[in-house]
Image: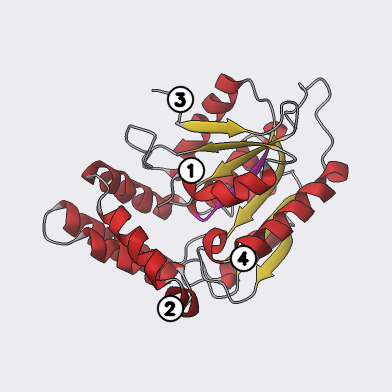
Amino acid sequence: MSVLAHRLDGPEGAPVVLLLNGGMMSMGAWEEIATALGTRYRVLRCDLRGQLLSPGAPPEDIRGHVPELVLLLDHLGISRVHVLGTSFGGEVGVLFAAAHPERTATLIAVTAVDFFDAAMLEDVDRLRALVAAFLAGEGTATAVYDYVAEGAFSPEYRSLKAADLAARRALVSALPKAWYEGLAVLLASLHTSDLRGELGAVTAPALVVSAERDAAMPLERSEGLAQGLKARHEVVAGSGHALIVEATGPLLSHVLAFLDDSRNLAPPVPGSAPGTA
């Protein structure tokens, strides 16, 4: 299996921040955040298996993404990272931190949850049905995007950014069927995303950032994640689930403050190479 598609930017020797995409993201969606982080940190972006730029079928269990990340870090010679994941990537980030505490300097989980309850899984399965209908030639890609956008953004943002969202809708609708096939597996793997049994294995300082009006991953379950991780918990007022797009500025403020504080919370591992913690 090939190494995940990736991009590494930022000053040599600086600590590394690993960015993990939401389910329907590709690494380019991090540009504003990566640019801001890149003045002080090396920034490693990647597409998980099943996302746009990394070929091959994604694992059916969400935990299967963790070895892929280890392979990527080993390939780049990076021993330790600050992990920042959003939504699906936030879930994967927690699992990485639990499985590899020695490689995790800090953990930031954005709009992520401790587990998917029945109502959340019903919502996931409605989206899966739309994807399956499109792949079977019985539905449309626009129906998939419209369903996601309604749950991802607040009504006010959808109204304010209608033109931008329409342009994104056209781009997503033009993606190849292989991307939708990968998305179908990523969505199905959310049925395996109950993190509660693994939260106690996370030893890194952690931050959970939630969106006040998150319709996809409700605040109650983000609070559960923060409690399980004994994490700092910040809530961004007014935003929907797509926090990295809808409220980039407030999110960055929380992330940078936490990373700056973490220099005293998470000292480098003795003997680790410069720029890896």
Query: How far across and down, in percent of the image, does residue 246 sit?
Result: 54, 66
Identified at 43% across, 50% down, the residue is 25
Residue 198 visible in the current orientation: no
Instruction: Determine contact: label 4, label 1, CB under 8 Å.
Output: no
Compared to residue 199, the image places residue 140 above or below, namely below
The disc placed on residue 210 is 4
The region drawn magenta spans 82-87
Q: Residue at x 63, y 41 (%)?
A: 98
Of callouts 4 and 2, the N-terminal one: 2
Asked if one can make out residue 267 in the rendered structure from this viewpoint, the answer is yes
Mark 2 burial class by Cα count in 10 Å: few <14, some 14-19, many 20+: few
Q: CA distance from mark 2 to mark 1?
A: 26 Å
Three-letter amino acid code of the residue under disc 3? Val
> Whole-Å distance between the Cαs marked 3 and 4?
31 Å
Residue drawn at (68%, 61%), measured in percent from left and top? 226
Residue matched to label 2? 159
Q: Predominant secondary structure in magenta?
A: strand
What's the mark number on residue 3?
3
- In the rendered image, residue 219 lying in the magenta stretch gets the answer no
Which residue is labeled 1 in the image? 27
Q: Residue 138: give x, y in percent of width and height.
A: 11, 60
The amino acid on which the numbered mark 2 sits, given as a three-letter code, is Ser
Name the kind of residue labelled 4 in the image: Ser
Would you say the residues marked 3 and 4 are in contact, meaning their CB atoms lie under 8 Å apart?
no
Check residue 83 for magenta coloring.
Answer: yes
